[in-house]
Image (tube, rainbow, N blue to C red):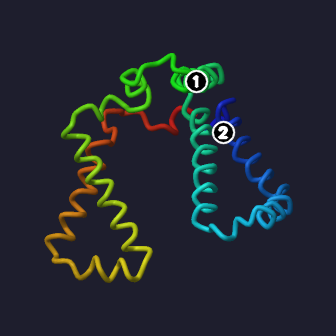
Amino acid sequence: HGASATFLVWGLIHGCAIALGLLTKNLRGCMYCLLQVGQYPRLHTFFKQILTFHIILVSWVFFRADSLDLAVQILRSIGSDLASLLHGAVSVPQAIDILIPSMFFSPIRYALVLTALGAAILIGRARSSEAWRAWFMRQRTAIRWAWYGLVLLMILTIGTFDTNVFIYSRF
């Protein structure tokens, strides 16, 4: 595929994140000791995951945008909507419109998505922890398959299936 400017920025963001992580390894180690982060390993892991998630999220804007101008416009829009919310320029119903996609306004869909998300979390925990796996496997087969069905329902409910364009064909 050809390398468009947006694809190059996407790669640059990832490369800079990796380089920054390597360059600041010793400094982060010192801060880790100084702030006694070791006392809260789960909180530390949570913040690392949140930071990584947001770096990836911003990079995807560039990956998916048709041009650099559009990517910058999208990021500015996100920032201005959030700033309006934080400074009280947006009411709570408007904030819900901004922060929650319209698909969630159906109470049934919202309940299905939350239930399926809970099922996905439970299945994920069961796969990563022996105690959870043992608990999950002790459940009746019908209950386990109900969880699997809820995960499938979540995928079908929040998935996007109406596009015919394969994303990589743009490059």
Secondary element under disc 2, as helix, strand or loop, is: helix
Residue 138 on image: x %, y %: 23, 82
Residue 109 placement: quadrant:
top left
Give the mark toward the camera: 1 or 2. Answer: 1
Residue at x 39% of width, y 66% of height: 124
Residue on which disc 2 sits: 10
Q: Residue furthest top?
A: 89
Q: Amino acid at mark 1?
A: Ala
In the rendered image, which quarter contains the N terminus? Answer: top right
Q: Residue furthest left?
A: 142
Q: Amino acid at mark 2?
A: Trp
Residue at x 47% of width, y 18% of height: 90
Secondary element under disc 1, as helix, strand or loop, is: helix
Q: Nearer the viewer, residue 27 or 21?
A: 27
Q: Nearer the viewer, residue 49 or 31?
A: 31
Q: Which mark is residue 5?
A: none
Lateral position of residue 144 relative to residue 13, left or right: left
Residue at x 27% of width, y 31% of height: 105
Residue on which disc 1 sits: 83
